[in-house]
Amino acid sequence: MILRIDRLQTELPPPSDPDPNGASAVQELMGGKFGEMSTLMNYTFQSFNFRNRQGARPFYDLIANIAAEEYGHIELVAATINTMLTGASGSGNGGPPAAPLEGVKDARYHYHFLAGGKGAIPADSHGAPWNGTYVFSSGDLIEDLTHNYFLETGARSGKLRVYEMCDHPAARALTGYLLVRGGVHQLAYARALENLTGADMSKLFPSPRIPTSKIPECQPHLERGEHLKLYRFSPEDYKEIVAVFNGTHPETGEDLTVVDNAPEGFPPNDLPAQTDVFAPDYAPEEIKEIAQKLRKKAGLPDEPLGVVANPGNGGSMMDKVKDKLT
Ligand code: MN3
């Protein structure tokens, strides 16, 4: 089972200038063949289907645990897309006969507005839905690990290309972080294969050659050693990862470590209501009132118990968001 923590794995900036076309490029990192839904579901199904777990425990623990981190990656990609869409289309006022969505008529990804409430969807940068054929779970451990190594290779190439296409601060923060973490996962699968077969994957296939040391948005993560750590996303389980994820980083020579907890994480930004798409309603104040009454009845304090990066700011943030398109 999965234990859920209401934090993001890395800090994202609050909404600034909306960038709906940039958000459509970021969709590739969500539902593209090499996106985060693919890494999540590949490792999830491989762990579900893993036979003779006790006999191969360190490898099972490694795959199952990386799957848990990938759940947090799809969450980050969604938060980035939603941030970039906040304020896109303009005023947010009025229903028919006004046309509050006219400002995004020429945006290249209408699903964000027509199918969703300026929210991420499980599809790629062209709107093709993510699909289960992207999952490779053969049952053969070496085959699966080799697939995973190259999946992480393709995933990191994709992140770099989105970085090169989008200079929106949220897209840059996302890709800077994911490039570093994808490097750890690529390395983890390389170490697993090396232990099983003797093949030194990072020497045989030194790809992709992404100079994270030259990417400014990677620096804070490198300084905190995020390129060396594999987190254990479970209070009690998956303790045998240490048997595989050890030794030194092939590029820097620093020691690899397993951290005995999930990362502390960062509170998400509370993104403001977008009334032109009825998200979460055409009159969000009414829902807020109902929630407040229910909260009171349940004996909860007046202030919401959830933690967000910008308490009390979700409603007024729209004022600060400039509209790029109209
Ligand atoms: Mn990932």
Image: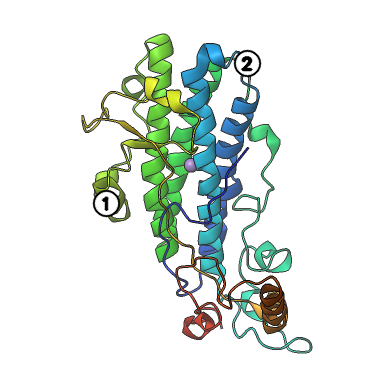
Q: In this picture, is 291 found above or below 27?
A: below
Choose mark 2 or mark 1, whichever is in front: 2
Residue at disc 2, secondary structure: loop
The type of residue carrying mark 1 is Gln
Q: Residue 219: which disc?
A: 1
**Residue 10 located left or right of residue 131:** left
* Residue located farthest toward the front when viewing the structure as drawn: 299
The numbered mark, 2 or 1, whose residue comes first in the sequence reads: 2
Q: Are marks 2 and 1 in contact (CB under 8 Å)?
A: no
Quarter occupied by the N terminus: top right
- Residue at the image point whose x is 55% and y is 79% from the top: 325
Task: Say which residue appears at 44% left-offset and 23% top-offset.
Answer: 240
Which element is circle 1 on? helix
> Tag 2: residue type?
Arg
Which residue is labeled 2 in the image?
51
Q: Is residue 16 visible?
A: yes
- Residue 286 location (% of width, % of height): 72, 83
Of residue 101 and residue 219, the one placed in the foreground of this image is: 219
Residue 142 visible in the picture? no
Q: Residue at x 64, y 30 (%)?
A: 45
Depth order, front residue of 48/198: 48
The alpha-carbon separation of the residues under discs 2 and 1 comes to 40 Å
**Quadrant the C terminus occupies:** bottom right
Residue 49 at x, y = what percent?
Answer: 65, 23
- Disc on res. 237: none
In x, y percent, where is residue 203?
A: 31, 21
Q: Residue furthest right?
A: 96
Of residues 125 and 70, which is closer to you in this image?
Answer: 70
Horizontal side of 16 relative to 94 (left or right) equals left
Figure check: 16 above or below 161: below
